[in-house]
Amino acid sequence: MEKQFNTRSMIFTLYGDYIRHYGNEIWIGSLIRLLKEFGHNEQSVRAAISRMSKQGWVQSEKRGNKSYYSLTERGKLRMEEASKRIYKSETPTWDGAWRMLVYTIPEEKRHLRDELRKELVWSGFGLLSNSCWITPNPLEEQVHSLIDKYEIGSYVSFFRATYEGMSTNKELVEKCWDLENMNERYSQFIQEYSQKYILDKNKLEKGEMSDGICFVECALLVHEYRKFLFIDPSLPQELLPDKWLGDSAATLFNDYYQMLAKPAKHFFESVFEQGVPIGN
């Protein structure tokens, strides 16, 4: 199969959807075998997992002549948070409060500022003005975790506030997030994957999809849908536009995923177990 996605991103998807549910550890040989299904070669897998290790997402352990990789605590937390958002069953209701984070990180620590920006966007914060970020979601835990991680407590002020104007809450949302673009992306996802869903459903019913193909299709589906974590802040229902397509996309994703999950899991287990040493 032609390689479609970045090797590192696919490894994240496999950890999030499979490996963390199987003892959080995998033999590098099994990982290479799994990634081969997506067109990634051994060299690219080893390079990607090495980079993830240097970045603090995974850690390695040597047993005999085999290397095993597991998620670090940081990696586990990121996967848990991502999973909650990917497989959320409904849009949360709003408590009416805004969380506001303001920072003044000095120029000599500019790299921290850049890292923090990425993390805030991923968590669902929107940029209201220079160095001032807001979210309607209760992300206090994530904020304190970020402050500890980057050791920037002395540069950050964090508020829980009410918005007193001069616009409406929905207009405030429009200033911070491009919901129109997100809706367009969701529309494209629905259009493409609703057709694929029907085709794959027919193939499965006729027994024309192997476990290996289901594994690939399921992982690629999760991988594609996971991209919305980087653009959709998971706003409460009260703040979303009337014709919001995020919930329809989530329903389609969940239905499609459930259809492929069992044979996909069966294939993963058949490869994964080859690398499990006796006694584990």
Image (tube, rainbow, N blue to C red):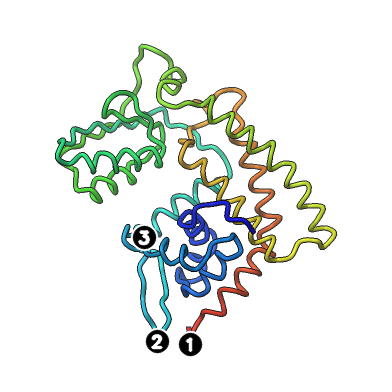
Q: Kindly check if marks 2 and 1 are in contact, taking CB atoms under 8 A apart as contact.
A: no
Residue 279 bears which disc, if any? Answer: 1
Image coords of residue 173 (percent x, y): 44, 23
Residue type at numbered disc 1: Gly
Image coords of residue 82 (percent x, y): 47, 50
Q: In which quadrant will I find the N terminus?
A: bottom right
Looking at the image, residue 274 sits to the left or right of residue 60; the answer is: right
Image coords of residue 13 (percent x, y): 51, 56
Q: Which residue is mark 2?
A: 64
- Nearer the N terminus, badge 2 or badge 1? 2
Q: Kindly check if marks 3 and 2 are in contact, taking CB atoms under 8 A apart as contact.
A: no
Residue drawn at (36%, 14%) of the image: 165
Residue type at numbered disc 2: Gly
Mark 2 crowdedness (10 Å alpha carbons): few <14, some 14-19, many ≥20: few
- Nearer the N terminus, badge 3 or badge 2? 3
The answer to whether residue 8 is above or below residue 86 is below
Name the front one of labels 3 and 2.
Answer: 3
Label 3 SS? helix
Looking at the image, residue 181 sits to the left or right of residue 57; the answer is: right
Q: Which residue is mark 3?
A: 51
In three-dimensional space, the C-alpha distance between marks 3 and 2, rounded to whole angstroms, equals: 23 Å
Looking at the image, residue 130 sits to the left or right of residue 44; the answer is: left
Q: Nearer the viewer, residue 204 or 155?
A: 204
